[in-house]
Amino acid sequence: MSDPINANPTVIDTSQLPTRLGKGSRELKPCDKLVLKILNLSLLKPADESAESDDQIPDLMSDVDSESTDDELEGADNEGIDSQEIFDLISTISDPEHPLTLAQLAVVNLEDIQVSDNAGAISEVSVKITPTITHCSLATLIGLGIRVRLERSLPARFRIRILIKEGTHQSENQVNKQLNDKERVAAACENEQLLGVILQMLSTCK
């Protein structure tokens, strides 16, 4: 007989999930703002509202008119990755048992994510997950889904550690070993059926 699932998990409303501005909208990082500037760039200066003739040809913008500078471009390339960005990557992963996301079920929480980002050197991301019940049989699957998502999204310099939060699962040590053993993870991802479930979990990611 399979382990019972948590039929009535605590669900967090999406409007209460952490963002860069708290509740509501998310603040754009400098690199995001730069992308928006680039997308909105025009070779033409805005038309003079006082111009009487529609046939007037506006002047081309000069380099001085552009708001994007070399310093901004360089800063965008070197923009570090923080715990909020990691949370944004994994918060919308679907739970394999419920039609809800890991963030809505509080399986992943912003305060349980640690990032050590050293540009040009080895960096590390540590994510602690909180199963909805202490005997959750799918904790390993959830951890694999998070690992696959981060490995596909983060630069190669990052080392990823997925852990069960202390005291939240009866097989904590065993699950931790499975989630951080390269050979076991590789073997699991070669299993087509298991990989199919993981991809289904990731299909809701934004």
Image: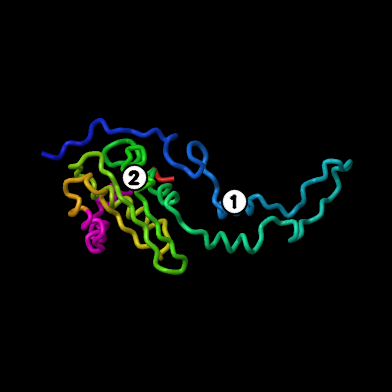
- Under circle 1, the secondary element is helix
The span shown in magenta is 176-203
The Cα atoms of the two marked residues, 2 and 1, are separated by 27 Å
Look at the picture and state if 159 lies above or below 56. below
Task: Farthest residue to the right: give it.
Answer: 52
Q: Which residue is mark 1?
A: 33
Position in image of residue 78 (x %, y %): 52, 62
Instruction: Tell me if residue 79 is in the magenta stretch.
Output: no
Q: Is residue 63 left or right of 195 when viewed as pictured? A: right
Look at the picture and state if 105 lies above or below 70. above
Position in image of residue 63 (x %, y %): 74, 61
Residue type, mark 2 in image: Val
Task: Farthest residue to the left: give it.
Answer: 1
Observer-nearest of 127 and 4: 127
Q: Is residue 84 left or right of 52 when viewed as pictured? A: left
Q: Which residue is mark 2?
A: 108
Observer-nearest of 169 and 205: 169
Looking at the image, tell me whether mark 2 or mark 1 is earlier in sequence order.
1
Position in image of residue 156 (x %, y %): 40, 64
Please report the residue visible at 86 percent of the width from the left and 41 percent of the height from the top. 50
Q: How dense is the environment of label 2, judged by Cα within 10 Å: few (below 14), some, or many (20 and up)?
A: many
Please report the residue visible at 10 percent of the width from the left and 39 percent of the height from the top. 1
Observer-nearest of 199 and 19: 19
- Under circle 2, the secondary element is loop
Look at the picture and state if 102 lies above or below 189. above
Q: Is residue 73 left or right of 200 when viewed as pictured? A: right
Q: How dense is the environment of label 1, judged by Cα within 10 Å: few (below 14), some, or many (20 and up)?
A: some
> If the image is split into quadrants, where does the C terminus sit?
top left
Please report the residue visible at 32 percent of the width from the left and 38 percent of the height from the top. 105
Residue type, mark 1 in image: Lys
